[in-house]
Every structure is written in structure tokens, then in C-alpha cells.
């Protein structure tokens, strides 16, 4: 019997026996073989239809192609960063309203949070693209994508921040008040900094969603990565290769953000240990 520390997983699940382990290996082997066969069938289909011809891939050997995609990636990062900043600011104030002692303000902010979380991002983008100009408001394409994406994300950010605030032990507030600090100072100097530490990984995870939502930038003709990819497709008639390379770039970007979230979460656990 192992003398190691018992984890929650050990308490909830029994150690698999020899038959179960053999079954797992067999099912895993069959699944991998099926995936390999599917991948081979897809590649063969691409080959049979000529999608693997050099003319659809050789332009990726040019510096101009990667420079063009790089400019699109920078546009994506700029739009995502601005949307994230706006979403955090708006989410902060919505969170304050959600925890406010005033019932009317709390109800209004709750309605706004539910509205922003329930409406698809694309509808917000179409609103800023088609409706807002009818009121004589002219906006750059950068803002037509950044603001709608931020609005779509701010409700989730507000709820994430609120969960962080609720996770801070009440004793922290009581101790600060007993030292003579005012309510606003207690929140800004004691409660909120600790809440941020709890929810940084969740905020980074939400940033991944923001990055993916910027792919709707083609609606407003903003030159992000996806829009520049569409230009390459038009120039070279290479839909498969361009979308495949673009997908790999998005996957690597989101993988980096996810790993950053995991690393920060692990660091928070180490620093918060007694």
C-alpha cells in the first residue's frame, strides 16, 4: 500500500485493475488507428483534388507572404489588446454595480451583464457597422471591431472579477475597517488587489476568447490576420493552404495564452501557500 499523500482523485476514483488497463490500451490503440486512417483519407482526398499541388504552397516561401500575414497578426493583437482593455475597464464598473448596496444600480448592472453575455458578438459588430453610422458617427474600422468585442466580453469579465472579490475572506475587510480605513480604501487597497490574484488565469482565458472574436474583423474590413488571409486566398486561389496556415497561427497564439494562464495559476498557488 502506498504511503504517499492521498489526493481527492484517489478518494473519488479507484485504481484501475489489470483488465481495465488492458481495455484502456486497446481502446486507445483503436482510436489512434482510426484517427490515423481518417487523416490519411483526408490527405489523399486533398491529393486527388490537386490541393497539394506546389502552386498552392510555394508562395509561403516568399518573405512578402509572411510579412503580409505578420501585419495581419499585429492588427489582430492590437484589436484584441484594446478590446481586452476596454472590457476590463467596463467589467470593473459593472462589477462595482453588481456588488453595490443600491438595489436599482445592482439590478441595472445585472441586466447589462446578462445582456452582453447573451447577445452574440457578431450582432454587436453589425450594430456598430450598420446602425451607428446612421446617427452621423464615423468610426475607424479598428474601433468598429474593438468596441463590439469588448462589449461582448465585459459581462463575463465583470462576473469573473465579482467571483474574485467574493473569494477574498471577509476577515480581510473586517481587519482593515478595524484599523480605521474607509470602505472605498478597503476595497481598492485590500480586497481588489487580492481578488485580481485569484482571477488572473480566468481573465487570460477570456482574452483567448477575445482574440478569437476578432476574426469577425472581415465584416468591417479591418486588416487583421483573417482579413489578410482572405486577400491571399483571392490572389493565389489557395483556400486550403492559406486557411490551414492561418489556423496554425491562431492555434499557436491561443496555446501560448493558455500556457501563460496555467503558469500564472501555478505561481499563484505557490505564493498563496501558508
Image (cartoon, grey):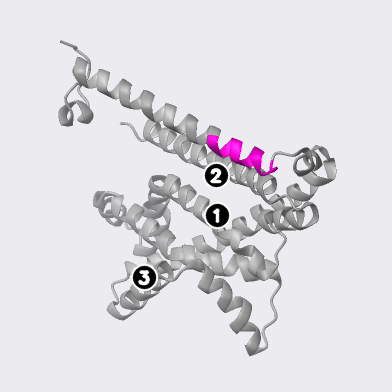
How far apart, in angstroms, are the residues tagged by discs 1 and 3?
A: 21 Å
Q: Secondary structure at mark 3?
A: helix
Q: Is residue 179 above or below residue 251?
A: below
CA neighbours of label 1 inside 10 A, class few (<14), some (14 to 19), many (20+): some
1 and 2 marks in contact (CB < 8 Å): yes
Q: Residue furthest front?
A: 48
Magenta stretch: dominant SS?
helix
Please give the residue where the numbered disc 1 appears in the rendered image.
212
The quadrant of the picture occupied by the C terminus is top left
Q: Of the residues tagged 1 and 3, which is closer to the observer? A: 1
Left/right of residue 5 with respect to residue 163 in the rendered view? left
Q: Position of residue 75 (x, y in %)?
A: 70, 56
How far apart, in angstroms, are the residues tagged by discs 2 and 3?
A: 26 Å
Q: Earlier in the sequence, mark 1 or mark 3?
A: 3
Q: Which mark is residue 114?
A: 3
Q: Position of residue 165 (x, y in %)?
A: 34, 55
Q: Residue 88 in magenta?
A: no
Nearer to us in this view, 163 or 237: 237
Nearer to us in this view, 68 or 156: 68
Q: Earlier in the sequence, mark 1 or mark 2?
A: 1
Q: Position of residue 272 (x, y in %)?
A: 36, 35
The quadrant of the picture occupied by the N terminus is top left
Nearer to us in this view, 217 or 263: 217
Residue found at x 74% / y 39% = 53
Q: Is residue 169 above or below residue 222?
A: above
Residue found at x 20% / y 22% = 6
Left/right of residue 81 with respect to residue 25 in the rendered view? right
Residue found at x 68% / y 53% = 225
Q: Secondary structure at mark 1?
A: helix
Q: Which residues are magenta?
A: 41-51
Amino acid at each position: 500500500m502506498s504511503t504517499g499523500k492521498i489526493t481527492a482523485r484517489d478518494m473519488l476514483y479507484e485504481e484501475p485493475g489489470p483488465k481495465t488497463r488492458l481495455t484502456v490500451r486497446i481502446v486507445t490503440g483503436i482510436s489512434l488507428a482510426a484517427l490515423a486512417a481518417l487523416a490519411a483519407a483526408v490527405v489523399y482526398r486533398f491529393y486527388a483534388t490537386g490541393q497539394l499541388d506546389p502552386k498552392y504552397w510555394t508562395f509561403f516561401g516568399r518573405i512578402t507572404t509572411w510579412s503580409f500575414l505578420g501585419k495581419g497578426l499585429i492588427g489582430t493583437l492590437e484589436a484584441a489588446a484594446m478590446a481586452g482593455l476596454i472590457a476590463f475597464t467596463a467589467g470593473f464598473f459593472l462589477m462595482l454595480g453588481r456588488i453595490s448596496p443600491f438595489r436599482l444600480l445592482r439590478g441595472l448592472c445585472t441586466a447589462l451583464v446578462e445582456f452582453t453575455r447573451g447577445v452574440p458578438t457578431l450582432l454587436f459588430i453589425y450594430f456598430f457597422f450598420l446602425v451607428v453610422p446612421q446617427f452621423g458617427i464615423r468610426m475607424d474600422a479598428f474601433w468598429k471591431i474593438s468596441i463590439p468585442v469588448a462589449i461582448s466580453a465585459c459581462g463575463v469579465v465583470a462576473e469573473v472579477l465579482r467571483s474574485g472579490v467574493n473569494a477574498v475572506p471577509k476577515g480581510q475587510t473586517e481587519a482593515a475597517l478595524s484599523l480605521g480605513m474607509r470602505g472605498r480604501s478597503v476595497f481598492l487597497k485590500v480586497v481588489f488587489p487580492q481578488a485580481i490574484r485569484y482571477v488572473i488565469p480566468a481573465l487570460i482565458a477570456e482574452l483567448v476568447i477575445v482574440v478569437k472574436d476578432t476574426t469577425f474583423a472581415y465584416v468591417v474590413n479591418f486588416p487583421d490576420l483573417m482579413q489578410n488571409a482572405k486577400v491571399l486566398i483571392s490572389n493565389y486561389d489557395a483556400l486550403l493552404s492559406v486557411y490551414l496556415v492561418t489556423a496554425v497561427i491562431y492555434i499557436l497564439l491561443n496555446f501560448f495564452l493558455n500556457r501563460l494562464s496555467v503558469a500564472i495559476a501555478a505561481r499563484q498557488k505557490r505564493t498563496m501557500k501558508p
